Amino acid sequence: AITLKYAAQRLGVGPTGKSDTPILELGVIRKALIPSLARTIYLNMSYNATKNLFQTHHQDESKIAELDRLCCLLKPILIDHCLRATNTCRERCGGHGYVAANKLGRHLADIHGAVTGEGDNIVLVQKTAKDFLEDLKSGVDQLPELSSETTNMIARSDSILSLESIHHLLCLREVDVTKDLQQRVNSKIQRGTPLFTVWMKQEATKVLDLGYAHGERVLWELAMEVLETSPAVLRPLLTNLMLLAGATYIQESLSWYLLHRVISYQAAASLQVEIDELINEITPHALPICDSFGIPETALKAPIAGDYISFLTESEPKSEWTPSRL
């Protein structure tokens, strides 16, 4: 919120050659901030759904294991996003991001605390993968059912920009990574390799891939449930935010989808154009979205989140401008 409020008033060079254009109108700023905002909303929807599930089922012993896995997959994905988003915000604020009064250094320090608050987050990702495979083996859980007709339709399509297509692509990756890891682990154990060696050394990367792939699919489904029950007036904007978050995630994993031939070259080529269009549609709503968070004004009391030009010209104690110790 601090960075978006700053970007909406900080003037940069515009068409006239003068500093008369808010930097939020510039593509390089929008492309850095708006996808982060979209993923923030998407993950917040998943987080709220998880809280509701915990409130409803926390005393149900049959649900404890499921809730435990859900929390284990949610924390690393949330904190990873917070870390990346906060660092991006600091960078987009330029030199102002170093100023202690603007609080970005403090927020970045808080996020680093969350990263290591319960130890290295990748341990939770490993636990998520382990618990998921055990539940598959025992029949408690199962892999998503995939329609070959839908898979073929997406592979031939010139666009993957729909909630259903993105969900199907998340499922495809989870299923493939799961079966690949199961085959690798079983094969090596049959040859006499100790499970610890296989899991923690030889296939450690595949284990993390599974944890994250499973997590993204589950969180997407939780967010979809929230979207379906959201007020009709909010649904179009929430849909665009989820589409942008999903499309950005698919783009980051585009090499995997192309190598497995589940996305056409045409769809891959048009993805950036579609992402840019979503960014332009969402940008006018960026500040109202930030206001909807209900963040107390005291938490947003940073010079660049208010009238920072007046702050620069007024006489302020120099201690306010002590560089953050990042």
Image (spheres, rainbow, N blue to C red):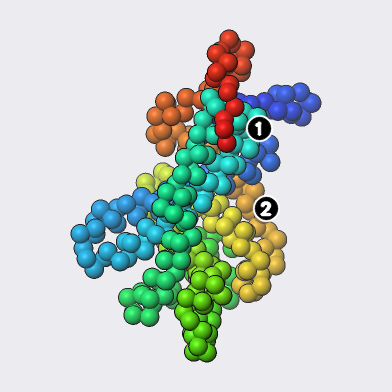
Residue picked out by circle 1: 94
- Can you name the residue that lies furthest to the top here? 315
- Picture mark count: 2
Q: Quadrant of residue 12?
A: top right
User: Left or right: 146 with respect to 52?
Assistant: right
Of residue 182 and residue 171, the one placed in the foreground of this image is: 182
The residue tagged 2 is 273
SS class, disc 2: helix
Q: Nearer the viewer, residue 304 or 223?
A: 304
Decide which of tag 1 and tag 2 comes sooner along the chain: 1
Which residue is outermost to the bottom?
A: 191
- Identity of the residue drawn at 46% across and 79% down: 195
Q: Label 1's element? A: helix
| Figure quadrant of residue 221 | bottom left
Check residue 213 in the rendering and tell me which mark sits there, or answer none. Answer: none
Look at 51% across and 76% down and name the residue there.
Answer: 197
Q: Dot 2: within a 10 Å radius of its alpha carbon, few (fewer than 14), some, or many (20 or more) residues?
A: few
User: Residue at image x 61%, y 63%?
Assistant: 253
Percent across and percent down for residue 325 are: 57, 32
